[in-house]
Image: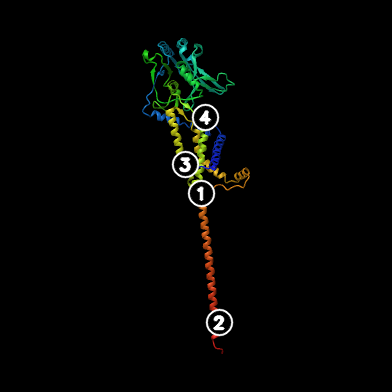
Amino acid sequence: MRGFRKRDFFYGFGVLVITILICAIVGALSFSTLFLDPVGQVIKSFHFTDSYFYIENNSEDISDANTDLVLYDLSGCYSRAEIAGAVQNLYDKGARTIALDVIFGGTSSHNPADNDSLMNVMTRCHDRIISASRAVSTADGFYFESSFFAKEAGCKEACINMENDIVRTFSPNLNFGDPSVFSDTCVQTFVSAITEMAYPQEHKEWIEKKDKSSLINYKHVFIDQWHIYDDIPDEEIKDRIFLFGDFSDLRDFHSVPIEVDGMRRISGTTIHAYAITTVTKDRLITQMSEENGMILGFIVSFLFCVVCCQVTEKYDKIAGLVMNVYQVVLLLILAFIGGITFLKLRYDINLVYAMLGIGLAGFSTDLWYYIITTRPYKFICRKLSGKKEQPAAVPAAVVAEEAVSTEISVDSTENETNNETIESETDIEITENETDTTENETNTESDQPLP
């Protein structure tokens, strides 16, 4: 393929502008981000990280464990007195942190003695207790649901809300509503509160990154799980973090991007455990910012648009096929580079905008080559250059076809001329023959004797 020319870069820039306009028009005409927003849905749902985690979890060297965490199952236990006794036992035996991923509300429906028992235990153990709260959406905004003992006992509270669809990220804080209207819209998350209490140094390093959200590292990790009715040895309790949760409550199950323990929907408590492990076990994944992702997308898309323009002028009729091959190859290369940087360097490259531009480049190129044949484009070029407009570049194949057509036309003209010449010569010969015949008849009459 010949080298790139200035015109290729100019045309490539025009194709890139058309691609951006297509995305802008589609976004502007969207009725709703939930109903008709193709571009927005592609950007939000396009996650190569799901495939990367799948590859990582299916490799051979995935043995990893978090011995600091214990998943403490409360399923089948409906006595608040028994739960209070379990909390007191863990506290007395040296548990580092006791995080309750359960909200204890509705005191009127339980035995007052049990409620008092739970209140007393939480008050005594409040310095190592983290109680869950939940933001509930209403027509008037949000209200926070929390355990009945949290305020009076002085326990630390943290929000357990997660993403509505597939849970991929977590963050230090969550914002609800409009900060100018509500004063307490920013709340600390469950994971942030636990790491701050149990891992202050790791929590500080995480906060210093100033990321609005972090990817949960779903690389498989083994975490101990005990039931409230199990007898736990004392050495299994000291200096460990216990996450209380009801692992049979399907209302607390959430979708995850890959299979965890053979399931695509797992308990929210387990998700919190994976998020805590991400922060504390050096499993944080650095994400490319949205701005850098857009810049990368513009650069890659522009270069590919230049290639598309060159391909269109060189191959003409098969340009679409060649561009499709280039698109597939380039997408595979980007996916490979993204996978290597993610798995080896723990860096997530934002390839969404680059791949969106590559996907639309073919259509945008065809549209651009139509635009340059229109009168408005020629008029603008003539005004900008101040010179007589030069004809637009014609693909080589079209030039060849026109040359062949010209040769055929010339040959046809020559054949017609030759035919006319032959017909003229034939007419002359016929005329001469008729003249000779007339002369012969005249001579014959003159030879006859007179009467």
Which element is circle 2 on?
helix
Q: How far apart are marks 3 and 1 (CA)?
A: 20 Å
Residue 142 placement, left or right of 261? right
Q: Which of marks 4 and 1 is nearer the N terminus?
A: 4
Q: Name the residue under label 4.
A: 290
Task: Give the CA separation, mark 4 to mark 1.
Answer: 41 Å
Camera-side residue of 218 and 153: 218
Please, what is the three-letter code of the amino acid marked with disc 1? Ala
Measure the alpha-carbon separation of dots 4 and 2: 109 Å
Query: Is residue 236 rendered to the left or right of residue 359?
Result: left
Question: Which residue in the structure is indicated by mark 2?
Answer: 442
Lower position in the chain sequence, tag 3 or tag 2:
3
Instruction: Give the structural element (helix, strand or loop) at label 3.
Output: helix
Q: Distance between the residues labelled 1 and 2?
A: 70 Å
> Mark 2 or mark 4, which is nearer the start of the sequence?
4
For residue 355, above or below residue 126: below
Residue picked out by circle 3: 324
Separation of disc 3 and disc 4 at Cα? 27 Å
The quarter of the picture where the C terminus appears is: bottom right
Residue 175 lies, in percent from the top left, at 54, 22
> Would residue 42 be visible to someone looking at this image?
no
Query: What percent of the width, then of the height, locates residue 109?
Result: 47, 15
Q: Which amino acid type is marked by label 2?
A: Thr
Q: Which residue is denoted by mark 1 in the rendering?
A: 396
